Amino acid sequence: MAKRIPQPTQAPRERAFLVGVDIYQQKHHLTLEDSLTELALLADTAGLVVVGELTQKLDHPNPHSFIGPGKIEELKALTEETLAQVIIFDDELSPRHQRELEKIFAPNVRVIDRTALILDIFAQHAHTAEGMLQVELAQYEYFLPRLTGQWTHLARQAGGGGGRAGSTGGVGLRGPGETQLEVDRRQIRERIARLKLELEKVRAHRMRYRAQRKRSRIPTVAIVGYTNAGKSTLLNRLAKSDVYAADQLFATLDPTTRRIELSGGYQALVTDTVGFIQKLPTALIAAFHATLEEIAESDLLLHVVDISHPNALNQFQSVQATLEEIGAGHIPAVTALNKVDRLSQPEVARETTRNYPNSIAVSARSGVGQIELLQLIKQELYETYTPVRVRLPYQQGALISLFHEAGQIERIEHERGGVAIQGRVPGRLMAQFSQWQVAENQPEPEEDEI
């Protein structure tokens, strides 16, 4: 007689109901329908199962409940009917909206917004000490203005590190007249201050590491793109490495740098960065400042686009807007139109390249277009340097160092008042040297002893 072996059971996933609002004159790169589809993917990544959605068009959000009173009643009925345990709003709720909605739906149904959901996903996927610090800081800064006496349900979104949102981490003696809520707020502010100090140390370490890399004269490339565009898979292909990659949103958070070989014996350091997304929480942008500096300080951007996605162009534009926001919009870029192998007509992607600047159709999984992409990267890094002759006063030590670190020096002579340098610098740095340029037909400076 066969004996049945008990199998480990998995806890049932929480049931989530989505709410999207189309607000008049509020512009986004995705339509409301596409944004809710993306929100459903985010919910799935966070371990939730979506059981329904509700939408409304408004001139402006309701000052009390974000959506109108009629929609609130409809939402109540739908959550009861679908046995939903979580309501997720597609926009970031103000602290007031959050409190009012909690009063309406508590205690049976939790209310969170898109930002809290993304923070939850980041908390699940942060594995390094730096990543956990960044996520924890973003969570505390998000939760602090929303702190109420009934805020313990937010503990699920808490991150790693030394503390968790929803827990005071051990309450000491209260001051005169302090309520428990005030104690919680004070301790969270103290924790935020400590986290910022820790991240400032991380930032200083990154700056030293970047300076060391620049001294090696190997140019840096930052891989950017919408989440799940295939950035990590492409890095693995180009560098023959094994960076973790998965077909899900925000599979990797922590930047990873690998060396790639280019033709002619040239090299580049390529860094995989966190994926972007529409409505990226401002708290995350602030908390991940040290990581995003990897992008802003790079010599070239490799923008990966999932060309098989129906909203590929909108995602491309969303990333471009975020790059402008973090001060990286001026950096030269190469666009890799990825996942061409998923198209029924791959030649369509090649025709589409004209819609994207400096682009190549590739497949990170199969290797299609890899040689052409590496050649384009080499061209941008090593063949678009601009020849320049400058005389830099010794007081311009930062520019002298910049030429040494980012440029290619062919000749250098020390004069009485400064340094004359002839060489090549990346086009994006030319503006910084324009004031000190020397005309080609100008006679060579006389050599002086230092």
Image (cartoon, rainbow, N blue to C red):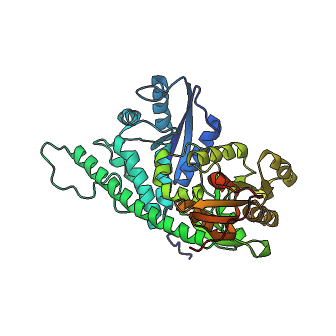
Left or right: 121 in relation to 150: right
Measured from the top left, where is residue 21 in percent x and y? 55, 31
Measured from the top left, where is residue 286 in percent x and y? 47, 50
Taking the image as drawn, is residue 301 in sight? yes
Q: Is the residue 249 above or below the residue 241 in the image?
A: above
Measured from the top left, where is residue 308 in percent x and y? 75, 51
Q: Toward the viewer: 181 or 444?
A: 444
Taking the image as drawn, is residue 244 in sight? no
How many labels, in total? 0
Q: Toward the viewer: 20 or 302?
A: 302
Work out which residue is located at the far left of the displayed protein and give it.
Answer: 176
Q: Quadrant of the C terminus?
A: bottom right
Q: Toward the viewer: 100 or 378?
A: 378
Q: Residue at x 45, y 32 (%)?
A: 76
Measured from the top left, where is residue 364 in percent x and y? 74, 63
Q: Quadrant of the N terminus?
A: bottom right
**Quarter of the figure with residue 447:** bottom right
Q: Is the residue 449 above or below the residue 273 in the image?
A: below
